[in-house]
């Protein structure tokens, strides 16, 4: 049941929620270079979004990670002209990848860098490596003006991530909450958000089907509104984080239709389970009807924007109704 305080927060915040276009919504198109990073700026501007979230590898040979300084400067100028914020993403916490992401972020005047660890080994050894990586970031980039987010990305549980961030004592580090990635760590979405809520400042919005796999769960991403995620409840709770000011400063629209991730954590495992190696996230290119699939992806991405905005208006109506009922008591 929504409280008066929550209703007031929603009414104050919901119409100006900072929505960002996420490059993964165009993952397949970017794999074949039909859509490039600069095109994402145009789409975000056309859709009246706050900014873009782009991985250093999005766009293959024309990815930000492949551009020279002059080309990165042109990208920055275009974003500035369109008044769009930029967030840079990388799929590792290792020093060389962080260095690359920060270099690009500084060149394009991004405001934030997201990373997630991909280590193999016993959980406690993996966490020790992550701690060391974050100390490297803290020691080298705390004065960069960038904020950093560590994403809950399928293998670590929410409370483990909170402990990592707390232990880092790094003021510019917080958590990026993904709508579905806790499933693979054998957690439920609302429970995971409750564990991480005090540290979440950014979000990846998507939907997914939960796939039981032995004593664990995988997920297959699907069109927003067609999956098992408590979409509206998650958005409602995220909007309400923060008392005087909104705690969540960026909501990434990350439609990922057909992306699959297996179970990584399991019921009954010991307190130091083995974390397997995994490649960075990728959705396989279809072997047939590629043209149709690429067109469908573009359509899905725009439909998600509409679905999210429609859901936000539903949440706003719930808030108005709550206040109306309160006033009648």
Image (cartoon, rainbow, N blue to C red):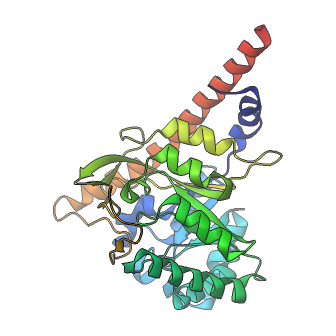
- Residue 143 lies in quadrant: bottom right
**Left or right: where 193 falls relative to 78:** left
Q: Looking at the image, can residue 149 be seen?
A: no
**Left or right: where 161 falls relative to 288:** right
**Which residue is located at x 29 percent, y 61 percent?**
262
x, y percentage for residue 243?
Answer: 79, 45
**Which residue is located at x 61 percent, y 30 percent?**
315
Q: Looking at the image, can residue 161 be seen?
A: yes
x, y percentage for residue 18?
Answer: 67, 51
Between residues 156 and 2, which one lies in front from this camera angle?
Answer: 156
x, y percentage for residue 223?
Answer: 37, 45
Between residues 46 and 217, which one lies in front from this camera angle?
Answer: 217
x, y percentage for residue 205?
Answer: 51, 51
- Residue 276 lies in quadrant: bottom left
Q: Is residue 93 above or below residue 181?
A: below
Q: Is residue 306 above or below residue 102?
A: above
**Which residue is located at x 63 percent, y 45 percent?**
238
Residue most toward the right? 244
- Residue 111 lies in quadrant: bottom right
Residue most toward the top? 328
Q: Is residue 200 above or below residue 241?
A: below
**Which residue is located at x 33 percent, y 63 percent?**
269
Question: Where's the C terminus, which quadrant?
Answer: top right
Question: Where's the N terminus, which quadrant?
Answer: top right
- The number of discs equals 0
């Amino acid at each position: 049941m929504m409280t008066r305080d929550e209703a007031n927060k929603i009414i104050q915040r919901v119409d100006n929620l900072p929505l960002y276009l996420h490059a993964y919504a165009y993952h397949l198109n970017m794999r074949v270079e039909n859509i490039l990073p600069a095109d994402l700026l145009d789409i975000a501007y056309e859709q009246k979004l706050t900014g873009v979230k782009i991985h250093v590898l999005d766009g293959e040979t024309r990815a930000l990670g492949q551009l020279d300084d002059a080309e990165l400067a042109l990208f920055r100028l275009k974003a500035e002209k369109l008044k769009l914020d930029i967030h840079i993403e990388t799929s590792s916490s290792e020093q060389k990848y962080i260095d690359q992401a920060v270099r690009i972020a500084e060149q394009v005047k991004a405001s934030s860098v997201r990373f997630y660890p991909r280590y193999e080994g016993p959980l406690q050894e993996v966490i020790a490596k992550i701690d060391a990586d974050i100390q490297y970031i803290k020691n080298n980039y705390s004065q960069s003006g960038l904020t950093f987010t560590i994403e809950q990305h399928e293998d670590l549980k929410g409370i483990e991530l909170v402990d990592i961030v707390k232990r880092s004592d790094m003021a510019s580090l917080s958590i990026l909450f993904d709508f579905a990635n806790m499933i693979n760590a054998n957690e439920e979405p609302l429970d995971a958000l409750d564990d991480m809520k005090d540290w979440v400042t950014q979000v990846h919005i998507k939907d997914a089907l939960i796939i039981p796999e032995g004593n664990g769960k995988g997920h297959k991403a699907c069109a927003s509104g067609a999956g098992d995620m408590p979409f509206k409840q998650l958005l409602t709770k995220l909007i309400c984080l923060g008392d005087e000011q909104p705690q969540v400063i960026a909501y990434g629209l990350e439609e990922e239709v057909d992306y699959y991730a297996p179970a990584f954590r399991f019921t009954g495992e010991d307190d130091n389970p083995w974390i397997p190696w995994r490649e960075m996230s990728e959705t396989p290119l279809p072997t047939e009807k590629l043209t149709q699939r690429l067109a469908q992806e573009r359509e899905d991405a725009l439909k998600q924007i509409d679905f999210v905005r429609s859901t936000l208006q539903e949440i706003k109506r719930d808030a108005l109704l709550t206040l109306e009922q309160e006033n009648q008591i």
